[in-house]
Amino acid sequence: MGTSADPLRTLLAKSARGAVPPEELTVHLEATLVAGIELARRVGRIEAAERVLDGRFWPAAQLSGLYHDGGKLPDGCQQMLLGQVRSWGERHEVVSLGFLPALVPDEQLLGWVAAGVATHHRALTGSNGRDLRFLYDGLTADELAKRIGPIDENAVTALLGWLHTTAATALLPTTHKTGTLSSISLTGTAHGILTELLNRWDRRVAANVGLAAVLLQGAVTVADHLSSAHGSLHTSQPFDHRFRPALEEQMATKGRVLREHQLRAAETSGHLLLRAPTGSGKTEAVLLWAARQVTELAQHTGGVPRVFFTLPYLASINAMADRFADLLGDPELVGVAHSRAASYHLAAAIRSNDNPDEDEQAGPCQQSEASKALARAAFTRLFRESVRVGTPYQLFRAALAGPAHAGLLVDAANSVFILDELHAYDSRRLGYILATARLWERLGGRIAVVSATLPDVLADLFEDTLDQAPTLVDTPDLGLPARHRLQVRQHHLTDPATTNEIRTRLDRGQSVLVVANNVAHALALFTELAPHCRALHGDDSAFLLHSRFTRQDRNRIEQNIRDRFASAAADRLPGLLVATQVVEVSLDLDLDVLFAAAAPLEALLQRFGRVNRLGAREPADVIVHAPAWTRRRNQPGEYADGIYPRDPVEAGWQRLLEHQNRIISEVDATGWLNTIYSTGWGKHWHGEVATHRDAFDSAFLTFRRPFADRTDLAQTFDELFDGTEAILEQHRAAYTQALTQGTAAEGRLVADQYLIPMPAWAAQLSRYEKALNVRVLDADYDPDLGLLAIRGPHRHAYQTSQVV
């Protein structure tokens, strides 16, 4: 380790972990500095922060990173890192503050560096016994010194000199004040600075100051995590000025050229509203727009802008990530940012594995792929990839700020955001998305909203939210073939007349899509129709898809569905797919005919898109059935099949009745939507969205108390956007065994294949097992039917008629 003549070699920052050796303190501090410099090059100049810090935001962040763990030199901390004691019990970041006055040249910069150092692990206030105020407020300097314990005087002097030399070598503002810093003066100075920090930040500050503060905290924590993981950042953006010529060359080989709306999008500078029908090259258009923004932002900020493509559903995110990987020719360039990202990478790794026999036994091959998948997901969490596909939810968590989430704000600065399928969000979630988009604009970002059917009311909300007016690109008549003929039935989807009609279509050798609004109806229809389909077309011709399957079963079912009904399939095969709305955007499918339950018009249009998707045939029948109105527990009003509020469904139903037996297009549908949103319900919806947007902005995105703890809100966020998950009692042994594979994280990933997603309110139906850190359900389950009846005292709370 070293000798007393070289005290720095004896100081550790990280303890040994398994086969990983301990890490020297100076090695970690220098790596954090390097990561901070790399992060600055990637993000570029953040105007909102530079205005507050007089152009010294990145020097403050890099100095904070360099100095952040200097306080690990006390004997108690070093003994803990060596494994000689279990816990030191004090906070090293407080001790780190003691070095700063001897190193930072002016008071203003010192205050910001101190804030970055002090808050890289803990909140200053408000975390119910874990924040720095709770731990240290009220102590005298002597009491603090006693708690910190002995510190090697030679180590203090040596580390102070090393910190100054390292900062000066990196051309950062630093000074090395004369005199020897002793252990007593170190803790005394730390006490004084901590007191100043608590006094300054334990009160409301201006919004611009609060934002700069959480950006600084985020920059320090990202650099710290990157250095700890020995990670690196992608320092190029594949969707830049090179993308358009590459795409044009690729299209030319197929005899195609860019269409008018794609050219307009490619030439648009600033925010974008893009309305483009299915089959028009919508994705290519918005990526051309993104490439233009990336080029301009890079020139303006000196950074490498990130591109975020957001979607509401897990499966559609995975499919889009695959599409981007194919478009770029390299899956390593695309990050997947959602709560189950590691599971996505595991499924992809196993699918592409060349040794499936070993996978079936869950042997070493699967363990290895689990390790790779976890690494990919971890790097995404550490902001590695410059192209990210994910949910808006992951970006919302920036509102929680703090050491765990402030890095999301830094990553969002000077970035490009593409928001797809906004129709899928209720008024509250949509309001939160708009509020967050307003924050992205403050951080120098540019935003696009993309939709096949963009109603005017949504365009108006988007324009009202942002300071800079977006450009609307509306697709002209491209002469695309009509794809759908609208049919309306006055009976419900589950009526015997419907099942008889579906059987007739199966008898004709057609592929039939049936979309119910809830799991109960989907189960009933599948149970009745699947035997008939299989008798005609084989055992592998009928499928059921909803959200209440284990991850491994859903992956298997979706892959089988793609194999049979993919839009790019060489041969058209007959068969049956019964699904809930999870099919609306999750799979690139092309079936012959649709039977659908009445739903809001936006949802129906997505269901239509799974039929005659490419328009290669005569217009296909899309048949919508009359709604059935029911009540929901503890909620007022009536709902279509227990899922959708009555007003928007009823308004859409009237439009359908007016246009039945006609050939329709997305252009028609946009007009219908404008009519619906001009009703009293539509005006009320507009007001709800705006109210939620402004409330979220005011409550969470002004950061008036930037270093106060917000972790109590994390559970609320999880319940609002992610729900919960559980395993089955009958899978408990297999889940427990899976946890033992490889490292703890690898085992958790493999075990996650047994999880079933559940609504947050359904947590009461399960029991929480602390030892396994998972909820357990006592329920009936079938690999091809999914979750069935739940047993237990609260079993009646779970109703398949109210879940999808």
Image (cartoon, rainbow, N blue to C red):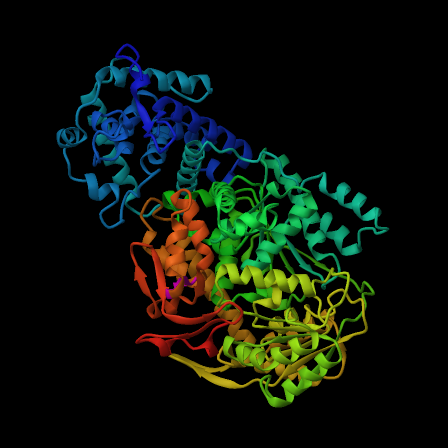
Q: Is residue 338 left or right of residue 281?
A: left
Q: Give the main secondary structure, helix, strand or loop, of the magenta stretch.
A: strand
Q: Position of residue 320 (x, y in %)?
A: 62, 54
Taking depth in this image into account, of 358 and 339 the one nearest to the observer is 358
Taking depth in this image into account, of 29 and 116 the one nearest to the observer is 29
Q: Is residue 15 left or right of residue 585?
A: left
Taking depth in this image into account, of 351 and 129 the one nearest to the observer is 351
Q: Residue furthest right?
A: 255
Magenta region: 723-729
Residue 598 within the magenta-colored segment of the rendering: no
Q: Quadrant of the N terminus?
A: top left
Q: Is residue 741 visible?
A: yes
Q: Position of residue 680 (x, y in %)?
A: 55, 79
Q: Position of residue 524 (x, y in %)?
A: 54, 81
Q: Position of residue 368 (x, y in %)?
A: 50, 42
Residue at position x 64%, y 86% from top?
A: 498
Q: Is residue 755 left or right of residue 160?
A: right
